[in-house]
Image (cartoon, grey):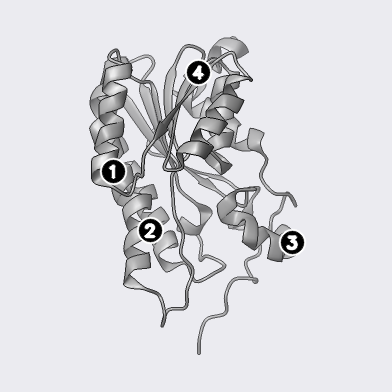
Amino acid sequence: MDLKELFDVSGKVAVVTGGGRGIGYMVAEGFVRNGVKVYIVSRNKGACDQAARALNELGPGRCISLSADLQDYNQVKSVAEQLEEREPEGIDILVNNSGANWASSLEEYPDKGFAKVINLNLQRVFTLTQLLVPLLKKKGTHEDPSRVINVGSIDGIRIPTQETYAYSASKAGLHHLSRVMAANLGNANITVNAIAPGPFQSKMMKATLDANHDEILKHIPLRRIGRPEDMAGICVYLSSKAGSYVNGAVIPVDGGSVIGNQQYVIKPRL
């Protein structure tokens, strides 16, 4: 019951997709500051390398940059092969965070936009997890399972505030995919959970927050935007001994947005 032992993640090996910025960077920083060796994956090599350098200054963990466009199956496969070569003894944690969004009216929503979002946010999460299961199995034990954390969204729980049809559908699908995977991987000593962030300062949310900051705060019971430690904290918890019996959960990290007043959502068409 020692607090430090319960939440200790030092010495573990994690992979965080989209770790070069936004929520992925918050998660990676939380891990590195607590002694985890972290591989961050991003299609923007320059930004990913820069993020890794910044994280390596924080310690005591380490950060390694891997460049890949996770929309592309072959590049996802390449990431898995690189990790097999670099970590032959296995990995402890996989955080599937990379994602895309597309907002457009129902009449103008493009097929290519819908396909792009579903592919990255849902299908490639399945692909990368599928390819990394052998490495996760190597580290997972009955007492300390390996962990998969899928980054969903409150827009996969509630009606979104904008016409982001593919995004909200992909995140709702990811939440349920997490449950299905949890049911099938638990006996392999791998837990699978999803977190559903609310508003956080990220590149994806910047334009929305800039335009609607005060209005958004009105509908968050805690009256604030998410902070880096909020995101780091939930992932450290799920990856530690304290979270070892949590499996198949979808956890909102949103200040109460889901239960808040939602009168500011888009008005239905009559």
Q: Is residue 89 above or below residue 165?
A: above
The residue under the point 27% across, 21% down is: 84
10 Å crowding of disc 4: few (<14), some (14-19), many (20+):
many
The CA distance from mark 4 to mark 1 is 24 Å
Q: Nearer the viewer, residue 140 or 54?
A: 54
Query: Label 4 belongs to which residue?
Result: 36
10 Å crowding of disc 1: few (<14), some (14-19), many (20+):
some
Q: Nearer the viewer, residue 41 or 33?
A: 41
Query: Label 2 belongs to which residue?
Result: 117
Q: In this view, which residue lies farthest toward the front?
A: 46
Secondary structure at numbered mark 2: helix
Residue 128 % position (x, y): 29, 38
Secondary structure at numbered mark 1: helix
Q: Given the image, on which type of amino acid does mark 4 rest?
A: Val
Q: Is residue 213 above or below residue 242?
A: below
Secondary structure at numbered mark 3: helix
Query: Label 1 belongs to which residue?
Result: 126
Circles 2 and 1: CB atoms closer than 8 Å: no
Query: Label 3 belongs to which residue?
Result: 218
